[in-house]
Image: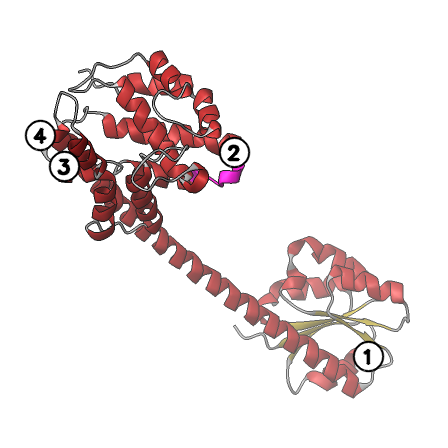
């Protein structure tokens, strides 16, 4: 329904007639001699009213009593109200604007000024309503788009997770790794990462980043696919050449991730590449393949490096028996398995019991 009606609250017959004469050519007119009558008309013709002219001084119910009655009904946000008054009072004007009126008309009326005030008020209010409607529609569209993007992201993440899980299973089968090795690495990484996030905010880790690091950690040893079985499964000590070939699983893994995999999540891809290449770097610079030192090694690669050592120590391999968790913990803290960051060791100390719990939860025993 079109808003084509002016509602006039005016008890003075002559003044009301003047206003009717001014606007009857352009609007339908509703007239009320007091506030009570006006509220009844407002209620019954609400959808068609374009603007309300409200006299301040009226019998039965004056203008401010009308405004007080409407204050909690959100009416003044849907229809513009212009107050009519013969008073010259800044306090009165301030009070009206606080209620939500858009303008004032002063008696005695100046016809051209009255028409201009009404034209400006109705035009501005119509523009405001159109703008609000447009913003509402845009917000709805944005919400729909965001919902679609979230659904697409979930689908892509599911694809990433399935791909990573499948590759991880292949790696476990191919390398004769302990059955739960990949799961433990992921859970250890989440656990240690959470401790680092809590203790050392300078690394700027977040819950989202930890999830990405967790998935990326599953591919830390993917380069071992390119290493011969005879070396991977050798029960005895490796020769120097064989050890060099084993070490190459870091660069081969990074190459596989960069050139062969199609990880849709850019963050997981970058973490996976970095972790695969650098999870054997050491804080003192004595690791491989790039000899990185200190915080040249990303915190993600540092985390996976430590948890990989812990899992290797606490797992049975073809060339060694499993160490007890406390023994493995002491070996890492004392530097018997390479040098780690003091901050990382502090974070590791805080989650010692959680690691032992995860080791039991994801045990390789049947």
> What's the distance in space between the residues labelled 4 and 1, CA to CA?
106 Å
> What's the distance in space between the residues labelled 2 and 1, CA to CA?
75 Å
Question: In this figure, which residue is indicated by the disc labeled 4?
Answer: 230
Q: Is residue 246 above or below residue 253?
A: above
| N-terminal label among 4 and 2 | 2
Give the mark toward the camera: 4 or 1.
4
Question: In this figure, which residue is indicated by the disc labeled 1?
Answer: 15
Question: In this figure, which residue is indicated by the disc labeled 2?
Answer: 200
| N-terminal label among 2 and 1 | 1
Answer whether labels 4 and 1 touch (C-beta < 8 Å): no
Q: Is residue 282 above or below residue 106?
A: above
Looking at the image, which residue is at 21% across and 38% down? 249
Residue 204 falls left or right of residue 260: right
Disc 2 secondary structure class: loop
Q: Nearer the viewer, residue 48 or 276?
A: 276
Give the mark toward the camera: 2 or 1.
2
Q: Quadrant of residue 252?
A: top left
Disc 4 secondary structure class: helix
Tell me which segment is drawn in magenta: 200-207
Give the mark toward the camera: 3 or 2.
3
Query: Residue 48, position in %: x, y?
Result: 58, 71
């Amino acid at each position: 329904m079109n808003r084509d009606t002016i509602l006039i609250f005016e008890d003075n017959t002559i003044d009301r007639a003047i206003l009717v004469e001014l606007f009857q050519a352009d609007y339908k007119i509703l007239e009320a001699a007091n506030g009570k009558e006006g509220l009844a008309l407002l209620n019954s013709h609400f959808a068609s009213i374009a603007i309300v002219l409200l006299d301040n001084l009226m019998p039965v119910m004056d203008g401010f009593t009308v405004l007080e009655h409407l204050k909690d009904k959100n009416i003044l946000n849907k229809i513009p109200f212009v107050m009519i008054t013969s008073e010259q009072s800044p306090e009165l004007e301030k009070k009206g604007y606080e209620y939500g009126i858009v303008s004032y008309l002063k008696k005695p009326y100046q016809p051209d000024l009255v028409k201009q005030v009404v034209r400006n008020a109705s035009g501005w209010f119509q523009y405001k309503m159109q703008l609000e409607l447009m913003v509402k529609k845009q917000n709805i569209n944005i919400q729909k788009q965001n919902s679609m993007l979230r659904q697409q992201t979930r689908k892509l993440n599911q694809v990433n997770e399935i791909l990573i899980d499948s590759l991880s299973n292949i790696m476990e089968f191919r390398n004769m790794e302990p059955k739960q090795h990949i799961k433990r690495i992921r859970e250890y990484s989440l656990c240690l990462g959470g401790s680092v996030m809590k203790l050392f905010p300078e690394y700027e880790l977040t819950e989202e980043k930890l999830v990405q690091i967790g998935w990326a950690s599953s591919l830390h040893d993917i380069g071992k696919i390119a290493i011969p079985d005879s070396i991977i499964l050798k029960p005895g000590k490796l020769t120097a050449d064989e050890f060099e070939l084993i070490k190459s699983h870091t660069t081969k893994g990074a190459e596989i991730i960069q050139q062969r995999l199609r990880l849709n999540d850019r963050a997981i891809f970058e973490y996976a590449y970095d972790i695969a290449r650098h999870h054997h770097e050491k804080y003192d610079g004595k690791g491989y393949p790039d000899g990185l030192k200190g915080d040249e090694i990303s915190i993600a690669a540092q985390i996976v490096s430590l948890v990989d050592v812990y899992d290797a120590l606490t797992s049975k391999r073809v060339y060694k028996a499993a160490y007890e968790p406390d023994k493995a913990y002491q070996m890492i803290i004392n530097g018997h398995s390479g040098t780690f960051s003091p901050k990382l060791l502090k974070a590791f100390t805080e989650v010692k019991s959680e690691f032992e719990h995860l080791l039991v939860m994801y045990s390789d025993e049947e």
